[in-house]
Image (cartoon, rainbow, N blue to C red):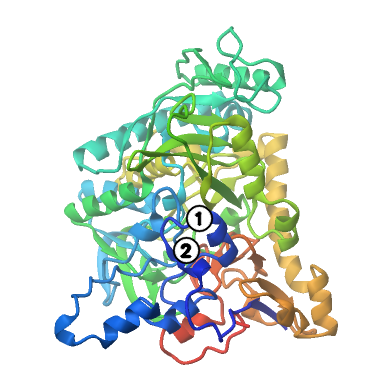
Amino acid sequence: MLTATVARAPARIARPTAAAAVARGARAPFAAAAALGPPAAGRRSLWMASAAQAGPGGGPAAAAAAAAPAGNRAPRPRPAPPAAPGTVDCCWEQRARVAPSRPPLREHARCDVAVVGGGLSGLTTALMCAKAGMSVILLESRAVGAGMSGRGSGAAPEWPAGAGGYARIESRHGFGACRQVARSRSNAFDWVEGTVLEERIDCGFGPAPGAALAPPGAAGAAGAAGARGGRAGGAGGAALAAELDACRRAGLGTSGSAAAGGAALPGRAAVLDPVLYAQGLARALERHGGKIYEGTRVKSGPFTISGKVATLASNSTDGPTVRAARGIVLATNSPINRSLAVHSRQSPWRTYSMAFELPEGAPDPPAPLLFGLDGRHARAVAAGAGRRLLLVGGGEGDHVVGQMRERYEAHNPYAALEAWARAVFPAAGRAVLRWSAVTFRPADLLGLYGTNPLDAGTPKTRIITGHGGDTVIGAAVAGLAVSGAIAGAEPEWAGAYHPGRLAGLLGSVGGLSDLATEIGLNVRGYARVLTPTCWRDVVGLVAPGRVERQLAPGDGAVVQEGLRKVALALCPHMHVLVQFNPLEKTFDCPGHGSVFDCAGRCVNGPSSRDLEDLGWRREAEGRGEGGGSLVK
């Protein structure tokens, strides 16, 4: 039997420990948060259980307040709504700011367009459709802004950071497609800038010129660029020079001005707060007549039989349905369907970010936005009260979702990211926050925006996926393509992003190699279901239960118990074996990128259901002791 297990904190702890109190804060030091695991609202997790046993407030002060006469008690402040499951502490205070504030769908409904997903892609597309005069219903499983787009960098460059630059795009798709991408991103930047102003979205939007970080091999990652056109020397400098030349061919003028470690990036760029931006888009959608239902999970499956979107009242009970007359849009990071025509051509990646204090008097980064051709990025973030943070992310520590836990122990991605940040930015102070996100990277680099492949039904189901971390501009490009197609006015550049395209995959050796890699990742995920994958599985075969007994509080594992395998530790999407992530305290699916918290709740698709055993969640929902295998 194959089970997913998380060891639980000892029941004898009756009061919150100092570490637990620190980790509950919105700005907790990242070391404590990482050691104890991220909190999840609505359940007694391995380190929040002791606080729940102590009662509201906990400790002697709370006991004295309870014993005081009623007339002498100070009025209690209204408690803040619980955070949405799966949110994290990051620069944008996602956990503190994001909570359900809208009701779930409780009755059948009809509309022109049904959008599934309340991240930037879903909100952007829904707003565009509503402003075009269509009736729109948006369904979100948790809360607006609770997904992966609320964990991004907040950068909005015209330069295609998610694809690694125009030189890579041109090598896969050719010169014509490269110019189409440039026009699409220019249109998307115009839309974001105009919408922030028109809808008065207070999200800190402002221009921020970007610069390229010198690639590995350039002379001094943070040193001055060469005198000619700001180009650094060496192999890294040649890659940067090739990128600038590709930008010119795509129609973007380049200044060639020198920047620390690289050159000024062509095109416009801006920064914003992605959580506040998402919440502003939601309010704008409602002003234009759109309806948003939070806490409403959609059932995966074919959607175009009759334009019907079925919801789930619980993990296994169907709820109300929404019938869409003109189209359904799946904007769920990865589509909640089982189409291998989509899932086999992109891979889920976990990308890491950290924030460091910038001491008073320390210099800012050499440019407001810094991007590397290797996927790294950096920017300064105002943190209030005159504090500044240095936000860095990406790079060699990023990896495919669902890697074996031994890989985390051998190659800690946060350690690699911190080492790079301190080498490039010596003024960086104490590391205060760290978090990760799941992004989807298509094998041929460009996002998948348009009609779901092999969809022959009416109305059409359209998908939005594969931003590669480029969430702000990627969402706007996707929204323009999808909403335009629904309205019958598809942009001329939309074909470059069509999910059924083959040219970028079959037209080059690199494309075929990447496609083979994506298919191999899927096959490997299924193979883990059938064979022991590590020494823990071997122990489970000969001594069932031993691995669980050896887990420390807060640790977790997927363990083998005897020869029989059950669906408990299999992702409900397409039944791939999940793997425990010791850094994030989650169970990650290596097949298609679904993520489940340590209570088994799905916090990232394409799965639309939780793991079979609900563990602590059943206890937290007042249905008695779960007795599930997710809890030791």
Give me the residue at 29% from left, 68% from top: 80
Q: Nearer the viewer, residue 311 or 198?
A: 198
- Residue 592 position, x and y percent, is 60, 60
Is 84 displayed left or right of 467 in the figure? Answer: left
Query: Which residue type does callout 1 highlight?
Result: Pro
Q: Nearer the viewer, residue 518 or 454?
A: 518
- Residue 472 position, x and y percent, is 40, 42
- Residue 572 position, x and y percent, is 57, 73
Sequence-first tag of 1 and 2: 2
The circle drawn on residue 54 is none
State how many labels appear.
2
| Relative to 371, residue 555 above or below | below
| Relative to 362, residue 521 above or below | below
Give me the residue at 43% from left, 65% from top: 303
Q: Nearer the viewer, residue 517 or 278?
A: 278
| Relative to 555, residue 356 above or below | above
Give me the residue at 52% from left, 67% from top: 19
At label 2, counting other C-alpha atoms closer than 10 Å, the crowd grade (few under 14, some 14-19, many 20 or more) is some
Q: What residue did someone put label 2 on?
A: 22
Name the element at disc 2.
Answer: helix
* Distance (Cα) linking label 1 and label 2: 8 Å
Q: What residue did someone put label 1 on?
A: 29
At label 1, counting other C-alpha atoms closer than 10 Å, the crowd grade (few under 14, some 14-19, many 20 or more) is some
Asked whether the residues under the numbered discs 1 and 2 touch, taking CB atoms below 8 Å apart as contact, a structural biologist would say: yes
Q: Quadrant of the C terminus?
A: bottom right
Query: Which residue type does callout 2 highlight?
Result: Val
Query: Splitting the image into 4 quarters, where does residue 409 fall?
Result: bottom right
